[in-house]
Amino acid sequence: MLTETSAGAAQNSQAAVERPSSPSFLDPILFYGTLGLLLFGPLAFGAVEAWSIFILETGAALLFVLWAVRQARSGELQILSNPLFFPMLVFAALVVLQLGLGLTAYRYQTFSTALLYCSYGLLSFLVVQCLRRTAQVKLLTIAFSSYGFAMAMFAVIQGISSKDKLYWVRTPAHGGWIYGPYVNHDHYAGLMEMLVPIPLVFALTRYARGPRKTMAAVAAAVMASSIFLSGSRGGMAAFAVQIAVLAAFTIRRQKSGRTALAAGIFLVIVVGLLAWLGGGELARRMASIHTEARAELSGGTRLAIDRDTLRMFTHKPILGWGLGVFANIYPQFRTFYTNFFVNAAHNDYLQLLVEMGALGFATMLWFVVVAYSRAIKKLGNWPSDTNGAVALAAMLGVTGILVHSLVDFNLQIPANAALFYVLCIIAAMEPRFGLPRRTSRQREGIQEASSG
C-alpha cells in the first residue's frame, strides 16, 4: 500500500506537473514527435548509418526548438526536473574536457559521438517535459506493445523466409546474422529486452482485464519468443534474468488467479511458438551456451578483446582515450590475428572504461544507481499503482540491456541506446501518474464532514 507520505508526494508532484501548463497545439507534436523518433530508429537498421543518425540528431534538435518555442508562447519557463539530469550533465562536462583539453585520441570521432549523445539527452529531456498525464502512459503502453508485437511477427516471418536480406530486399555489405531490421541478431534481442516488459507488466496489473489482459500476454509472449528464435544467447540470458526479477516482485506482491492466468497464457504461447518454430535448432543453440562460455573463458575472441581493452585502460585511466574512439585505437593493442574489423569491445562496460576513463565510468555507474534507487521506491504497490507499474516495466527493460551488455554492445547502437536512456529517465521520474483523483475528493469530503 502507498503510505500517506508517498501518496501526498505523488499528489503534489502530479499537481505541479498538471497545474501550470496551459494546452498548446505544440504539445501533441512534441509528444508524438519524440515517440516517433524512438520508433524510427529500430526500423532504420538500428540507426547505425549516416542518414539515420542525421535524422535522429536533427529530429531531436528540432523537437527541442519546438519545446523552447512552446515555452516562449506560454510566457513562462517551466522545466520539470529528473534525478538523472545531474549525472548526465557531469558526463557531458567530462566529454567537453576531453575535447577542450585535447585529451581525445581522435577529436572528430569524439565530437561526432558527442552529438549523438546530445540527441539521447534531448530525447530524455523531452520525455520528462512531455510525459505528464496518465492517458499518455496508456497510449505509450499501447504504442510500444503494438510496435513490439508487429516487429516480432515481422522478424519471425523474415527469419523463416529470408535469412540473408533485410526487409527481403537489402543484402548487408559486410554480412551479418540478420534478424528483424537489424544486421546483428543480438541487437534485435536487445530491443526486445526493452519492449517485452511493457505488455508483460501491464498484463499483471489490475488495469488489464478480460481481452486486454489476454492481448497483452499474447503480445509479450510473441516478443519474448522472438528473442529465443533470434538465436542470441546473450538475449536469452538477459531475458531469463528479467523474468527472475519480475517473478520476485510478482510472487511477493500478489497471488491472484488473474495473475496466474496471465502468466499461464504467456508461458503457453512462448513454449508453443518455440516448439513449433524453433525445434532442434533452438535446442542446440541453447545447449551451446555452456560450451561457448567455457570456450570463451579458456581463450576465446571476446576474452582476448577484454584483456586488450583492459590494457588500453591502463594507458589512460582517468579520462580515457576519448568518447567513441575505441575502434580507431584498438588495432594498436590487439594481440590476435583476425580479418575482421573490431568495431566495438563486445562489452559496453569495458568500452566505457576505455573511452571515458574511471571518471566517466563512475559517472555512468552513478546514473544507473540513481535510476534503480528511484524506481525501487515506487514499487510498493505496483499492480495497483500506475507509477509503480511504469517504474517496474522501465527497470526490467534497463536490466535486460545491462545484463546483455556484459557480452555485447547494444549501447553502441543508436536506436537501442536512445530507448535505454529514455527508460532510465522514466524509471527515475517522480510519481506523477495514476494518482486517483477520488482520493483527493474523499479527503475533501472527510474534511467537510468533520467541519460540519
Image (cartoon, rainbow, N blue to C red):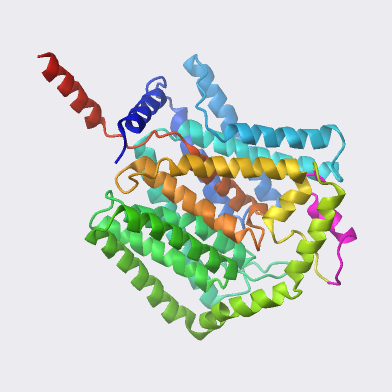
Q: Quadrant of residue 348?
A: bottom right
Q: Residue at x 50, y 21 (%)?
A: 78
Task: Tell me if residue 200 is in the magenta stretch.
Answer: no
| 146 to 450, vertically: above or below | below
Residue 70 in sight: yes
What x and y, as percent, mark residue 58? 65, 38
Q: On the rendered image, what quadrant is the C terminus found in?
A: top left
Indicate left or right for 312 with 79 as reference: right
Task: Tell me if residue 321 is in the magenta stretch.
Answer: yes
| 125 to 281, vertically: above or below | above
Q: Single out the residue that lies furthest toward the bottom.
A: 280
What x and y, as percent, mark residue 427? 48, 43
- Judged by its main secondary structure, the magenta piece is loop
Q: On the rendered image, what quadrant is the N terminus found in?
A: top left
Q: Which residues are magenta?
A: 320-338
What x and y, as percent, mark residue 243? 44, 62
Q: Quadrant of residue 186?
A: bottom right
Q: Residue at x 43, y 61 (%)?
A: 149
Q: Residue at x 27, y 50 (%)?
A: 206
**Nearest the eye: 62 or 219:** 219
**Nearest the eye: 243 or 223:** 243
What x and y, as percent, mark residue 382? 35, 46
Q: Residue at x 47, y 48 (%)?
A: 394
